[in-house]
Image: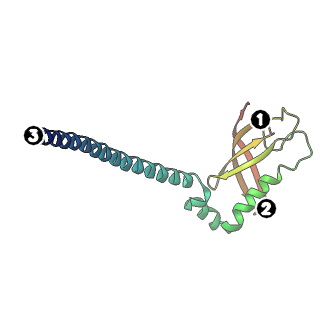
Amino acid sequence: MYLFIFTLLLVIFQYVNSKSIIEGYDKKLTNYKETNTQLKDSIRLLQDNAIANLYTFKFDTNDDAMTYWEDQGYRISEFIPFIKDELMNLNVYDTEDHPLVPYASMSGKKMVIDQIRMLNHKWIIASFTDGTYWGEMLLEYTIKDRKDLKFRVVESILYRP
């Protein structure tokens, strides 16, 4: 009889103890699931913002800028490569200084424009480097008579290593 009562008490104690442990694990699991859902939502929001930022200040997604040049008789599919090619062609120069980059090379190498982003029908952001020093510049571009393309540096900055 004592053995039966002792066994019954032991089983009840194990049941209560196991139940509290399982409920604790369930709470933790629920909290982890809620946190995971919140983090996934945050990641999705950040990705959506990052994708939206990729299209901000970009000629390809600026209908007004494209319409401006289309109204002047240009085909956008040919216009963008034309502007970028003309800008990159300025990297081939015989003088000591780059025709557009307002800084002289300090490493003995030539300054070259390496990245270009057309913002709209008027401005371009370009980065330049000589392999050691680098910088960025805001360019204004104009086209007259469909062939006379002019670039003007509006502002620039040089970073130091």
- Residue sitting at x 75%, y 61%: 82
What is the quadrant of the C terminus in the image?
top right
Q: Earlier in the sequence, mark 1 or mark 3?
A: 3
> Which colour assignment does the render follow?
rainbow
In this figure, which residue is indicated by the disc labeled 1? 133
Residue 5 numbered mark, or none: 3
- Residue sitting at x 60%, y 59%: 65
In this figure, which residue is indicated by the disc labeled 2? 147
Labels 1, 3: front one: 3
| Vertical comparison of 73 with 101: above or below | below
Q: Nearer the viewer, residue 15 or 1?
A: 1
Q: Residue 98 vs residue 114: left or right?
A: right
For the residue marked with disc 3, what is the amino acid? Ile
For the residue marked with disc 2, what is the amino acid? Lys
| Vertical comparison of 137 with 107: above or below | below
List x then y, in percent, for residue 67: 59, 64
For the residue marked with disc 1, what is the amino acid? Tyr
Q: Residue 11 vs residue 129: left or right?
A: left
Q: Are marks 1 and 2 in contact (CB under 8 Å)?
A: no
Using the numbered discs, state the Cα–Cα distance from disc 3 to disc 2 in whole angstroms. 103 Å
